[in-house]
Structures are given as C-alpha cells and as structure tokens.
Image: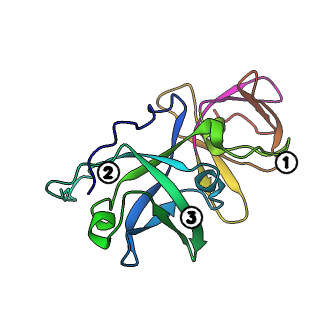
Amino acid sequence: MTEVQHDAPPWPQDAVEVARVIGAWGIAGGLKVKAYAADPQALFSTKRWYLQPAVPQAGVPVKLVAGAPLPPVLRVIKAREQGDSIVATVQDITDRDQAEALKGARIFVSRGSFPSLQDDEFYWVDLIGLRVSNRADQVLGQVVGLLETGPHCVLRIQPPQVDKAEVLIPFVEVYVDQVDMAQRHIRVDWDAED
C-alpha cells in the first residue's frame, strides 16, 4: 500500500458514514463497496472518500494487514453501480492485494457534498435527532434511526421515558404531517401510547 498522503485534505466536520469496503474488484486494485442507502448518490457526488478502520464486532476477529496503513482519504477516479454493490477505481491503489487490505474500512463523505433534494425529500442522517410530537402536541420522543422496509421507511422514535419501548412510525404522508428542519421537529398523526 502507498504511504499516507501528506497532502490529504482535513477530515470534514460534517462527515457521514455512507458505505464500507467489502473487498477487491478485479486485478488492478478496484474496490467493491457496499453502500448503506438503497440509492447511493452520496458516494457518486464526491471524488473524496474518507476512511476509518472497521469497527470490531463481538466475536469477530479483526484481521490486520501488516505494513499497510489505512489511507485517510481515497481519491475516486471512477465509481459505478454493479448489482447490489459499487465498484470503484481510486488513485494510489494499483493491485488486488492493496484493495483487499482495505476490506472492512468504513467510508465517509462530507454531508455538504450530498446531492440536493426536492422539498419533500430527506436524507436519513438529517432526520436522526429530530424531536417528534403528535397533533395534540404530545412529545413522542426523538428519532434514533430508520428502518428500510421495502415500500417505505419507518421512523424509530425513542420516547423521553427511558423505560418505554421504541415507537415505530411509517415515514409516509398519511402519518407525517410536517418535517421542519429549521426547528428540528417532526409533527405526526399518531396517538401517544401510555
């Protein structure tokens, strides 16, 4: 693997994890990448992918590749969808062994480089942390994540009471009245459960 680049750009303040390297592609150092979103446009919107090592998981040994420091940033030459993954060629990764050494690395991009959305579209990362209340102004909790169910996404709401279970609300127009990003608030048509 090449040495760490001294001219690497600084880590972006608004970095968002969007994918991970799942292996090598081809013999010339291509990477196979798994995007976290069904529509991986965030990966295609920038030519700089910032890297961090894989997060160790309980019971899964971490494989270290001797003498292969993780580059802080990949400069993307070309990336495209191939099946359910992304294949990419990047500067300074020129053979299969170098690409394999990056397996498991987490890929981040600057939130500022994400493509623009329509007025009624939102990135998941922007919804996490928003306060949720219903039409009766009862606070239901805070968005802690989303689930992809196929036909639509579902908001995972953590109630303010620690002993209460998560509330799951489909993120569809029939239940979501308003998303106010400026106020960091979502108003829903949903009864509070006691």
Mark 1 lies on a secondary structure that is loop
Whichever of labels 3 and 1 marks the residue nearer the N terminus, that label is 3
Looking at the image, residue 39 sits to the left or right of residue 145; the answer is right
Q: Is there a contact, CB below 8 Å, between mark 2 and mark 3?
A: no
Per the model, the C-alpha gap separating discs 2 and 3 is 21 Å
Please name the amino acid that badge 3 sits on: Ala
Please name the amino acid that badge 2 sits on: Ala
Mark 2 lies on a secondary structure that is loop
The crowding category of the residue bearing disc 3, from other C-alpha atoms within 10 Å (few below 14, some 14 to 19, many at least 20), is: some
Magenta-span inclusion, residue 167: no
Please name the amino acid that badge 1 sits on: Glu
| Label 2 vs label 3, nearer the camera | 3
Which residue is located at x 66 percent, y 60 percent? 39
The crowding category of the residue bearing disc 1, from other C-alpha atoms within 10 Å (few below 14, some 14 to 19, many at least 20), is: few
Stretch of the chain drawn in magenta: 129-145
Q: Quadrant of the C terminus?
A: top right
- The residue wearing badge 1 is 173
Mark 3 lies on a secondary structure that is strand
Q: Is there a contact, CB below 8 Å, between mark 2 and mark 1?
A: no
- The residue wearing badge 2 is 54
Per the model, the C-alpha gap separating discs 2 and 1 is 37 Å
- The residue wearing badge 3 is 79
Which image quadrant is residue 44 in?
bottom right
Q: Chief secondary structure of the magenta span?
A: strand
Which residue is located at x 37 percent, y 57 percent? 92
